[in-house]
Image (cartoon, helix red, strand yellow):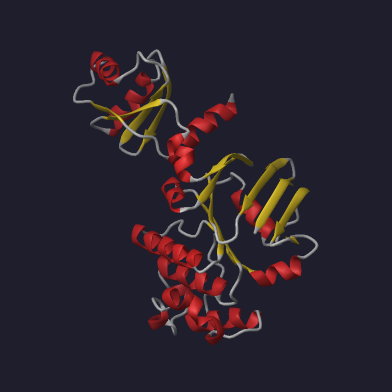
Amino acid sequence: MIKVGNLEKSYGDQKALKGISLEVKKGELFGLIGPDGAGKTTLMRILVTLLLPDKGTATMDGLDVVADFRKIRTMVGYMPGRFSLYADLTVEENLKFFATVFGGTIEANYHLIKDIYGQIEPFKNRPAGKLSGGMKQKLALSCALIHAPKVLILDEPTTGVDAVSRKEFWEMLNNLRLQGITILVSTPYMDEANLCDRVALFQNGKILSVDTPKNIISGYRRKLFGVKVGTTAQRFECVGLLKQIDGVDSVFSFGESIHVSSGKTNVDEKTIKEYLNSHGHQGILVEQISAGIEDVFMELMQNEGK
């Protein structure tokens, strides 16, 4: 459904996309995973015909994003990262407006948005600007769907939304995928990668890896240890100490835990604990753990920099 080949885009001297190539299958829920500034938004804006690429090609359902931009705009639903609906119009007025823009009505495609819009319909007379973050996202998704698009492109739809609303939003996306809609979604949250059929890990305008979340994680070959300490100050000091252990490849702080990777046999739970104990850190908990998407991402970033 989406095919990108050697796509490049620069803003002055800043290269946002450095020869990106990927394919998204029809009916797939595909995730672009990476931090801010990785190039995710630039790629999406090119796909929805809001930006022109400098080099390379991009097609949607066989249509070229430059030559066939008018046709593409009728078949794609786009939800930008920033809330872009009309704040002074009511919920219902916004939905009617977007349906009318595409020459349709709310009634014609209500079945597509019923489960989503039904949650905010009791507030249909409330100005969109006065909705909560989660309700704004549901309205924006409804407006992106009201013309029955073949492809749905969502730029960081859950950023700044509470955990419950994030979970609900991804359940909605999965339901839409089951209806045959192709979905391309970007997110800076690594845990959301596991909710996609396939993902592309983005960094500095490049794709580091493209595969299913399971396959990406299974490619992690090093031993990984989780280290838990008492305080934030102690954790900060331990990160520096752990980097000094011979055979340790990487050390990163993950929330309340420190992740330590090693490909050497001499590094194990006992080695790590005894080293920290010898430097005055007691009550340390060390266990070997399984890698997650974020661990793989950090490893790929390290390799990219070498």
Q: Nearer the viewer, residue 265 or 243?
A: 265
Picture residue at 72% right of the left edge, 47% below the top: 5
- Within the image, what quadrant is residue 221 found in? top left
Q: Is residue 247 above or below residue 53?
A: above
Of 135 and 271, which appears nearest the observer?
271
Side (left or right) of 81 relative to 270 = right
At 55% from the left and 73% from the top, the residue drawn is 145
Q: Quadrant of the N terminus?
A: bottom right
Q: Give the answer, above or below, for where 38 lies relative to 52.
A: above
Residue extending furthest toward the right: 67
Percent x, y of residue 71: 73, 70
Position of residue 15 relative to residue 40, above or below, is above
Residue 16 visible here? no
The answer to whether one can see residue 306 in this image is: yes
Residue 11 at x, y percent in the picture: 72, 47
Where residue 62 sits: x, y (%)?
Answer: 73, 61
